[in-house]
Amino acid sequence: MAADPFVLNGQWRGPLKVPGGTLELIVTIVPLTNGGYYAALDVPQQRIYRMPVEVTLKGNDLTLQIEQAGSSFVGKVLSNGTILSGNWKQPGLSGPLQMQRATSSATAAGKVRLTPPYREDDINFTNPASKLRMAGTLTVPAGAGPFPAVVLVSDSGPQDRDAGEQEYRMFSILADYLTRRGVAVLRFDDRGVGKSQGSYFNTTTIDVVSDAQAAMSFLRSRDLINPEQIGIIGHGEGANVALLAAADTGPAKPAFVVSMAGYGLPGRHVLVQQQLEIMRLIGASPAQVKAALALHVEMIDIIRQTPNDAQARGKVAGTLRNSNTDLDPHMARARAIQLTSPWSRYFIDFEPARQLGAVKCPVLALNGTNDLQVEAAGNLSMLRRGLRNSRDVKTKKLSGVNHWLQPNREEWAIVNGEQQPTFSPVALETIREWIAARTTLPSPVPVTEKRKEPVKAGKVTKGSSSTAPRASR
């Protein structure tokens, strides 16, 4: 088969006509080191973010399958990848859709920027368990130290060290905020993303735990870091990674954990809740919601009851085809492979409460009331109940905050006349205050910020002090 004429990498946006108006669809596509793609769908008007998308590219023919929402896009890649043109289909709606490749924000590249008042280096560390080399960025406050430090662990899905979502660089913002206030921060590319080795699709939650442990070991080797005050801040699945690392019986445990949008309920229950919310948001009828949930539960049961991957994939693909006769067999097979991946199998059976009793370190758990992926009240209740053996546990519901720790849209910052997504100031200060109360923060040495020459987006060299968002990988 002839090689694809180009590699899709970036973000495409386009208006979908719906009864009563239009919805802006945003599709982000990231190439992986194994030659495949990871993609996600955002529909900000419906508060849908990072919904998994299956990508099939054959020459200029492109198929995007969003099985979780019963939706698909079939079309062509035009103008050397700048336009995706075709037909969109979802429950109760079908119509043409054209998406344009999004250009980099003026705030993301090509501007004169300020050198931050702290040290910043691109680093590498090796996970001895997997023998993989991981790449990341370490930011250390100015001064002699030693400083407390945190490792940042991202949510599910392959993400770079900044945990980028559209123009929002969640981990870059968090690292900058904490480092300016006396806490060193290490953030790293997930396996198979950016400059880290490995394959995301062969990675389980436990594998990511070992990556986080290796990152902590790297920090303990640094002269400016206090080895007794190294914690983990995790987001989504990363929060559960942090808690599992704290529950490990080995000696290299985190001194504290901050859980952002972490799960307390079993993984399969979380998936069902997400499916229900998604179907509601896309305007599916009660009958369609009932059918989608029944299909979702049936596939989960098949996977749990069929340990042989080949057999499970055949059953899941057949179930998907029976429920949707228009579904391409190759797409059904691709979805079945995804659902039976090592990560999916682990997550479906994952029950956080069973292991949280081994956590003894201080824990801060934050969940937003506007989080449609991880419902705040139920998950926080389960987390608190499971963390019964830790004497220092604080849980907090953040009013108006979504899964990405963003406040209500009216509170977003305005940059060059346009609103830009913002990390909740309340969340940032809550995390800083909580860490400060449990660590020793040396007085940072004042450093005068200096102007530096523009740096091309995405290009960061060892010792670079640029904190501008990287271009999408």
Image (tube, rainbow, N blue to C red):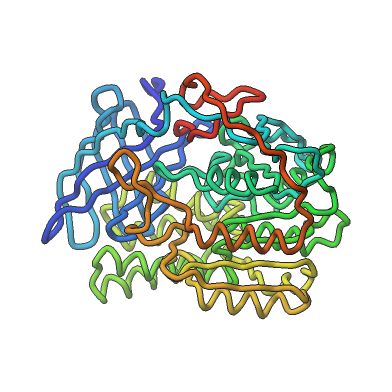
Quick one: quadrant of the N terminus?
top left
Q: In the drawing, does residue 228 fall left or right of residue 85?
A: right
Image position of 30 with respect to 323: above or below: above
Q: Nearer the viewer, residue 121 or 195?
A: 121
Residue 365 visible, this angle: yes
Q: In the drawing, does residue 315 fall left or right of residue 264?
A: left
Identify the residue at image location x=44%, y=57%.
406
Q: Position of residue 234 (x, y in %)?
A: 62, 56
Q: In the drawing, does residue 409 fall left or right of residue 352?
A: left
Identify the residue at image location x=50%, y=50%.
338
Q: Position of residue 314 (x, y in %)?
A: 48, 54
Res 107 → quadrant: top left
Image position of 371 with respect to 181: above or below: below
Q: In the drawing, does residue 456 fall left or right of residue 18?
A: right
Q: Nearer the viewer, residue 441 or 88?
A: 441
Identify the residue at image location x=24%, y=67%.
283
Q: Position of residue 54 (x, y in %)?
A: 40, 45
